[in-house]
Amino acid sequence: MELVLAIAIGVLVASGVWLLLRPRTFQVIIGLTLISYGVNLFIFSTGGLRIGADPVLRDVVGKFEQYTDPLPQALVLTAIVIGFATTALFLVVLLTSRGLNGNDHVDGGDGTP
């Protein structure tokens, strides 16, 4: 299970970096989104991969190893909300830049060398 999660994180971050280096603004936004998904999976995996374990502590004293850590889950939930807000902001900047320049290249050029 850990190997599958590590491969998924690696593929997401590698795809995000590849898209981040593209010349179009929309591809850069999608690349940043994929990188944030990879980071969210990494943070989520730091809480421990336990199948069928309760995420919230009950009134049991002692045996804490049977529970998952709820802090990474809260951090990922917060990161998802912040990522959604920044993606919306990037899209507004993209549309404004495209309206002013007539194209959506990152450097403002028309794509010709």
Image (cartoon, rainbow, N blue to C red):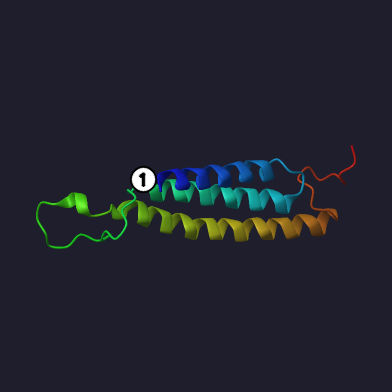
Residue 52 located left or right of residue 113: left
Q: Residue furthest left?
A: 61
Closer to us: 86 or 46: 46
Would you name the residue on which mark 1 appears?
A: 46
Dot 1 falls on a residue whose secondary structure is loop
Above/below status of 108 relative to 76: above
Amino acid residing under circle 1: Thr
Q: Residue furthest top?
A: 113
Residue 98 located left or right of residue 64: right
Q: Residue furthest right?
A: 112
Image x and y of residue 99, in percent:
81, 60
Tell me the residue at 49%/46% (across/down): 39
Tell me the residue at 72%/56% (across/down): 94
The C terminus lies in quadrant: top right
Closer to us: 102 or 111: 111
Tell me the residue at 59%/52% (across/down): 33
Which picture quadrant has residue 13? top right
Above/below status of 41 relative to 89: above
Image x and y of residue 101, in percent:
84, 53
Count how many numbered circles sit on residues in the image: 1
Tell me the residue at 65%/55% (across/down): 90
Image x and y of residue 102, in percent:
85, 56
Residue 80 located left or right of residue 23: left
Which picture quadrant has residue 109? top right
Query: Label 1: how many residues lie within 10 Å, few (<14), some (14-19) or many (20+)?
Result: few
Image x and y of residue 70, in percent:
30, 55
